[in-house]
């Protein structure tokens, strides 16, 4: 996959195996997983398998989550991107485009999620011509819910997962015909 997006402060590029150490650092942190099933990554091998799975999504779906790099320091700050969800059902939906992101805790509250989201939504709606972008967040994750609202997503509904945890379903429709 040769797509690279660039913003004022970020370079957004496909995940590589060389990102494994920094991605493991992020996903090993329980705070990062507070609103993500509370299951932090335990080994770097798990992280490598995730990267390989995402790289397969690039081939199969021509899109996926991308490494998000801080230009100023060349640091991996997390991943952002569009994923085509066809491997499970979420809130009664499958075969849909999902926007998501995960950042290392030390990069929270600096506007990076919003900045990356704006770039991705521009790409997804205007280059990929996605008609409907979806996103879902833990109901109590106020920061992520705020970012999605700020970049134009509309809250659709709350829904429970199979454990009864409440999530929010978000949607952004492409008005360009």
Image (spheres, grey):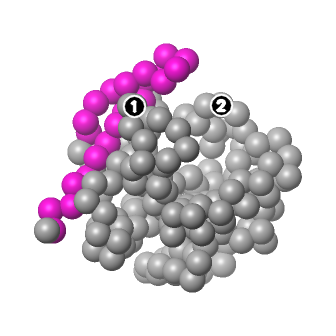
Write the start and end of the magenta stretch as one range: 155-176
Q: Nearer the viewer, residue 3 or 7?
A: 3
**Helix, strand or loop under label 1:** loop
| Image quarter in which the N terminus is found | bottom right
Image location of residue 126, percent across then percent down: 28, 74
Image location of residue 77, percent across then percent down: 62, 64
Q: Does residue 171 sit above or below 81 in this rendering?
A: above
Q: Does the magenta stretch include residue 125?
A: no
Q: Quadrant of residue 53?
A: bottom right
Image location of residue 173, percent across then percent down: 22, 55
Magenta part, dominant SS: strand
Q: Estimate how packed mark 1 is, as few (under 14), some (14 to 19) or many (20 or more) residues with alpha carbons within 10 Å.
A: some
Q: Earlier in the sequence, mark 2 or mark 1?
A: 2
Q: How far apart are marks 2 and 1 (CA)?
A: 20 Å
Q: Estimate how packed mark 2 is, as few (under 14), some (14 to 19) or many (20 or more) residues with alpha carbons within 10 Å.
A: few
Q: Does residue 129 sit above or below 93 in this rendering?
A: below
Residue at x-position 28% and y-position 54%:
132
Judging by the rendered image, the residue that carries numbered circle 1 is 91
The numbered dot on residue 130 is none
Judging by the rendered image, the residue that carries numbered circle 2 is 38
């Amino acid at each position: 996959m040769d797509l690279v997006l660039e913003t004022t402060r970020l370079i957004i590029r496909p995940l590589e195996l060389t990102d494994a150490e920094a991605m493991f650092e992020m996903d090993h942190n329980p705070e990062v997983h507070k609103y993500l099933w509370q299951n932090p990554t335990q080994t770097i091998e798990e992280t490598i398998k995730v990267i390989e799975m995402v790289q397969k999504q690039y081939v199969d779906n021509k899109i996926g989550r991308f490494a998000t790099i801080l230009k100023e320091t060349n640091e991996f700050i997390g991943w952002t991107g569009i994923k085509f969800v066809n491997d499970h059902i979420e809130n009664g939906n499958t075969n849909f485009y999902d926007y998501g992101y995960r950042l290392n805790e030390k990069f929270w509250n600096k506007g990076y999620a919003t900045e990356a989201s704006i770039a991705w939504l521009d790409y997804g709606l205007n280059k990929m011509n996605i008609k409907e972008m979806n996103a879902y967040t833990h109901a109590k994750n106020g920061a992520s819910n705020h970012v999605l609202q700020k970049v134009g997503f509309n809250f659709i509904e709350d829904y429970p997962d199979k454990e009864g945890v409440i999530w929010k379903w978000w949607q952004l429709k492409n008005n360009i015909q």
